[in-house]
Image (tube, helix red, strand yellow):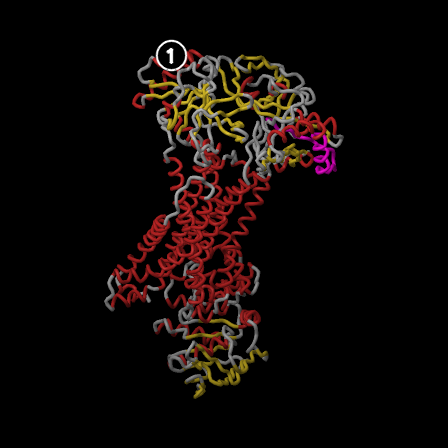
């Protein structure tokens, strides 16, 4: 599904040029559950952003589902993204001004799903995440675990082929963290490809394969049994 | 999707009340200003447009040269031009002369009411779109005893009864004369140059000494109605040919007598141009206006709205750090940039819409005050007019774009990576925000300086020593019985003296005096009695004042300017001057004094004494401690002697102040706009300071932990903003200096632009801006550092 080759990304300020990704090559197959690990500043999040087409690489190739997307315009990337990729963040990133229902509904609105269909699909996914009873609450009224469930509901409501998770349990206690990991595992078992950045060896053990990054390069790949 | 946008917009607005209030308040005030001025300008440019024949109607006007070579434009004509041109020039289909008669007294039961009278040819109803409700337009004014009134007047005098055929008693030259109502017209729109309530035949207004072929008097307005597709230039040529045929010999004589430069030629002024035209109006027409006023008012209103829009742009941009997260999330979830632009423009539209609704309420509330200020009779009902509604809708859309477009572009361009990971820094946009704040304060400081200069000049005009003492003098208009009135009043202890003059003190008659072979044209003259100089405290600096009443009426006094104009270097006493065939002897010289407003230079002046005490004005000096008693006595004595005319009197000081009406109005307009612009600018500054401090909470905390004092911190926060105001002052000061100097050149007597004015205005602006920010800065400096650090 994903093939990146010799990917490079620099961050420039006036005096310093920092290399975030250094000729990185990775392949992820459909249906895989991959964890990306590494110390702070090793380029994990940069990689995830490029994979999610939120950012573009400076050099190298990124083939998504057989299409070269490395130098797509923002509009093309946005279009590809909204139909194929769901995001889960450490800090949940829910819109405070919208209710649980409206937050989850957002991706459907942007992909132009008709209203009746939207209601059906949002209710379905809220039900699955067991937060139906909270549908009219605002994010601030929920616990961290509940907020992350809403975020996952939002990530999957559009039935994406790929879910990108950036430390999804980073802001949660261990019990809620485990719940979230179970949810991701379920989704993976139903066929969704998952790429997850994490600091936690415990969480990484849910994945099929761990890619360890150091200074923008892949150093080790562990295959989980 | 729309519902989602609207909801986010409203939740955002409620969550950020300060920000929303500042924006809505500023925008609604700005929009209200622009709406008011839009109504004003619309009224100005739509003047007279309701006339169906408008494009074919012209006023006969004259361009000419005085004997001294100066040019003049004259909008008035005499009684003969209209008739003669119509007879001799086939392209002229019809003509109509219109004259105003001031007010006349009309009897209503036991009451007498003073009402305005207009005189016109009966063709008025064929030429102008002034429909009659009843009466035959062709014949309503065929008899000099006929009168046409409007429906309002018909109701006022006759109630529900039909007015046609009824008699109105109207005072003409001191006697009540019966007039038969032959027509009732629809009320004339207020934006009509030809406007009446009582309309009589023009015959009644032609002067008694009027001769059928007097081509050299101008005292009324003559309109011509041309045949369709006639070129007015060609008619002008024909008019001048006719004029030359009738007056060629007379003109030649005049030129010989007064100077070869004397000339006069007829022009046609399109009726639609009359209201804002250069010939002015008068003699019964609705007062004209200057186009400049529309420009200045439009400019000021535009600036105020602009300042409010800058607030919107700046506050939206500053808040974008907070909204960055929402933008990022929306993008991650599939929103395109276009959708985000639509969303933000939508928010700006909603805000502007709310502000517009409030603006309409402000507009309705302020309309009466505005009408007084602008000399208009605009009504709130004009808002229902589709054109006005169209203008306001356009304004709403323009304002949405003006204030919403730039922030929408910037905000929608945020990269989700930066916003979601908190890497977003607003450094790039800070320059823009700062420049916009500077622009706001340039406008505000400019207006503040303008206000200070205008206030000082106005005070100067009001308080300058006029060269005489106008205080405690009541100017009573007296149609007859001056002697009796004076005698009767003299028995009261609180009446100090009474003197007589032929016209109200502040209005001037002027004529030509000849000094040897020098011709002093348009020289003002006073006709007064022998008490006049003493009562007003005007010193005679050479020669003597007038003797007693029966003194020699060929004796005159002149002022110092007259001596200069006459070129007399030796003793002026005993010199002869001529007015027409009458020769006068100069017996004394008075100090130059400001008989008219300080808006004009002191002219040469001749003071004559009237042979018979037939003065039209009695100047009564009263004891200021017993003002009420004195006024009562004046009214009582007047009623005894002149029972048929209501008394008209003024304190001389008030009539003098009235001459500065226009200055007073502009002073008010500029003061209000300066206050508004500085207020809205400061509101914006307050909002910006609040947001900037919010973003620097962590920095403030760290500084405090490291030992910074409250004064330290608040000054760091304030200096950033005061720097901008300071830059604005540096830009605005020379601009304002230049502009106000230019404005002052209009006044022959003016204050000096001095540096203190600039310093006061600038210090004032700095202090107001400083106070605005100090509240937030000190609050931030006082906050507990632990709290701000923990919230990170």
Q: Residue A200 occupies which quadrant of the picture? A: bottom left
Location of residue B550 in the rendering, given as x and y in whole percent from the top left corner: 43, 14
Closer to the camera in the image, B189 or B498: B498
The residue carrying mark 1 is B488
Closer to the camera in the image, B392 or A216: B392
B58 magenta-colored: no
Location of residue B121 in the rendering, given as x and y in whole percent from the top left corner: 65, 23
Establish if A77 lies above or below B3: below
Is residue B511 shown to the viewer in this render?
Answer: yes
- In this picture, residue B652 sits left or right of residue B122: left
Location of residue B690 in the rendering, given as x and y in whole percent from the top left corner: 36, 57
Location of residue A188 in the rendering, given as x and y in whole percent from the top left corner: 49, 76
- In this picture, residue A201 sits left or right of residue B351: left
Q: Given the current orientation, which residue lies at the most extreme right position?
A: B90
Is residue A135 shown to the viewer in this render?
Answer: no
B241 magenta-colored: yes
The residue range painted magenta reads B219-243
Establish if B773 lies above or below B383: below
- Residue for point 40% across, 56% down: B730
């Amino acid at each position: 599904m994903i093939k990146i080759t010799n990917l490079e990304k620099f961050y420039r300020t006036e005096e310093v040029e920092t290399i975030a990704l250094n000729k990185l090559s990775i392949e992820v197959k459909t249906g895989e559950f991959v964890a990306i690990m590494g110390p702070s500043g090793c380029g994990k999040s940069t990689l995830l952003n490029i994979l999610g087409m939120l950012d573009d690489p400076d050099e190298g190739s990124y083939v998504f589902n057989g299409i070269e997307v490395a130098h797509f315009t923002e509009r093309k990337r946005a279009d590809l993204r909204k139909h194929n990729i769901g995001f889960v963040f450490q800090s949940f990133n829910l819109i405070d001004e919208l209710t649980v229902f409206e937050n989850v509904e957002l991706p459907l609105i942007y992909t132009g799903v008709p209203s009746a269909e939207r209601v059906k699909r949002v209710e379905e996914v809220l039900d699955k995440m067991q937060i139906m009873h909270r549908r009219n609450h605002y994010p601030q009224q929920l616990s961290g675990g509940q907020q992350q469930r809403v975020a996952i509901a939002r990530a999957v409501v559009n039935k994406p082929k790929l879910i990108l998770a950036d430390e999804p349990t980073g802001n949660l206690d261990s019990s809620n963290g485990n719940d979230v990991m179970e949810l991701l595992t379920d989704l993976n078992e139903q066929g969704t490809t998952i790429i997850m950045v994490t600091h936690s060896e415990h969480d990484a053990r849910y994945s099929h394969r761990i890619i360890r990054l150091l200074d923008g390069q892949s150093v080790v790949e562990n295959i989980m049994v | 999707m729309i519902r989602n946008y609207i909801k986010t917009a409203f939740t955002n607005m409620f969550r950020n009340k300060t920000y929303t209030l500042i924006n809505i308040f500023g925008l609604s005030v700005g929009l209200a200003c622009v709406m008011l001025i839009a109504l004003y300008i619309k009224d100005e440019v739509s003047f007279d447009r309701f006339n169906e024949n408008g494009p074919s109607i012209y006023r006969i006007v004259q361009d000419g040269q005085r004997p001294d070579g100066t040019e003049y434009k004259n909008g008035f004509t005499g009684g003969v031009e209209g008739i003669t041109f119509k007879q001799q020039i086939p392209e002229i289909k019809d003509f109509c002369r219109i004259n105003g008669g001031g007010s006349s007294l009309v009897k209503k039961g036991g009451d007498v009411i003073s009402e305005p009278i207009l005189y016109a040819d009966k063709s008025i109803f064929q030429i102008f779109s002034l429909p009659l409700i009843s009466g035959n337009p062709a014949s309503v004014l065929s008899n000099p005893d006929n009168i046409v009134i409007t429906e309002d007047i018909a109701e006022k005098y006759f109630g529900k009864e039909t007015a046609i055929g009824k008699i109105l008693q109207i005072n003409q030259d001191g006697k009540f004369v019966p007039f038969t109502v032959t027509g009732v017209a629809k009320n004339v729109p207020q934006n009509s140059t030809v406007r009446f309530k009582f309309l009589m035949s023009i015959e009644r207004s032609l002067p008694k000494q009027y001769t059928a072929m007097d081509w050299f008097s101008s005292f009324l307005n003559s309109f011509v109605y041309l045949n369709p597709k006639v070129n007015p230039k060609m008619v002008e040529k024909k008019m001048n040919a006719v004029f030359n045929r009738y007056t060629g010999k007379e003109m030649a004589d005049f030129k010989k007598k007064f100077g070869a430069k004397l000339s006069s030629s007829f022009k046609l002024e399109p009726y639609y141009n009359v209201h804002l035209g250069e010939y002015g109006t008068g003699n019964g027409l609705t007062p004209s206006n200057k186009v400049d006023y529309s420009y200045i008012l439009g400019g000021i209103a535009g600036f105020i709205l602009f300042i409010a829009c800058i607030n919107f742009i700046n506050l939206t941009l500053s808040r974008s750090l907070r909204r960055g997260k929402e933008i990022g999330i929306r993008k991650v979830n599939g929103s395109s940039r276009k959708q985000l632009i639509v969303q933000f423009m939508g928010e700006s539209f909603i805000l502007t819409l709310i502000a517009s609704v409030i603006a309409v309420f402000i507009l309705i509330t302020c309309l009466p005050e505005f009408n007084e200020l602008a000399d208009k009779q605009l009504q709130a009902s004009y808002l229902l007019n589709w054109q006005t509604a169209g203008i306001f809708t356009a304004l709403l859309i323009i304002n949405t774009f003006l204030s919403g477009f730039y922030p929408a572009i910037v905000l929608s361009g945020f990269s989700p990576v930066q916003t979601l990971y908190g890497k977003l820094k607003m450094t790039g946009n800070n320059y823009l925000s700062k420049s916009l704040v500077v622009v706001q304060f340039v406008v505000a400081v400019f207006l503040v300086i303008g206000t200070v200069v205008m206030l000082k000049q106005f005070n100067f005009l009001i308080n300058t020593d006029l060269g005489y003492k106008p205080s405690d003098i009541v100017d009573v208009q007296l149609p007859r019985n001056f002697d009796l009135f004076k005698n009767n009043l003299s028995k009261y202890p609180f009446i100090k003296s009474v003197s007589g003059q032929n016209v109200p003190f502040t209005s001037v008659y002027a004529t030509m005096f000849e000094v040897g072979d020098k011709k002093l044209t348009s020289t003002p003259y006073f006709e007064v009695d022998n008490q006049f100089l003493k009562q007003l405290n005007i010193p005679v600096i050479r020669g003597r004042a007038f003797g007693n009443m029966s003194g020699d009426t060929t004796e005159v006094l002149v002022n110092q300017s007259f001596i200069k104009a006459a070129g007399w270097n030796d003793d002026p006493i005993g010199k002869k001057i001529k007015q027409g065939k009458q020769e006068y002897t100069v017996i004394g010289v008075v100090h130059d004094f400001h008989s008219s407003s300080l808006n004009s230079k002191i002219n040469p002046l001749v003071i004559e004494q009237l042979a018979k005490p037939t003065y039209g004005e009695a100047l009564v000096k009263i004891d200021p401690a017993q003002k009420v008693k004195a006024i009562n006595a004046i009214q009582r004595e007047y009623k005894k002697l002149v029972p048929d005319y209501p008394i008209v009197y003024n304190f001389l000081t008030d009539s003098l102040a009235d001459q500065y009406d226009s200055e007073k109005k502009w002073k008010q307009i500029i003061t209000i706009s300066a206050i508004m612009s500085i207020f809205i600018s400061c509101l914006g500054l307050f909002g910006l300071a609040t947001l900037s401090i919010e973003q620097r909470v962590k920095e403030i905390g760290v500084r405090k932990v490291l030992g910074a004092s409250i004064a330290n911190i608040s000054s760091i926060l304030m200096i950033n903003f005061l720097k901008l105001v300071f830059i604005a002052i540096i830009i605005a000061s020379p601009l304002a200096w230049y502009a106000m100097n230019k404005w002052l050149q209009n006044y022959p007597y003016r204050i000096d632009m001095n540096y203190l004015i600039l310093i006061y205005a600038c210090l004032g602006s700095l202090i107001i801006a400083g106070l605005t920010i100090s509240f937030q800065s000190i609050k931030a400096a006082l906050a507990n550092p632990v709290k701000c650090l923990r919230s990170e």
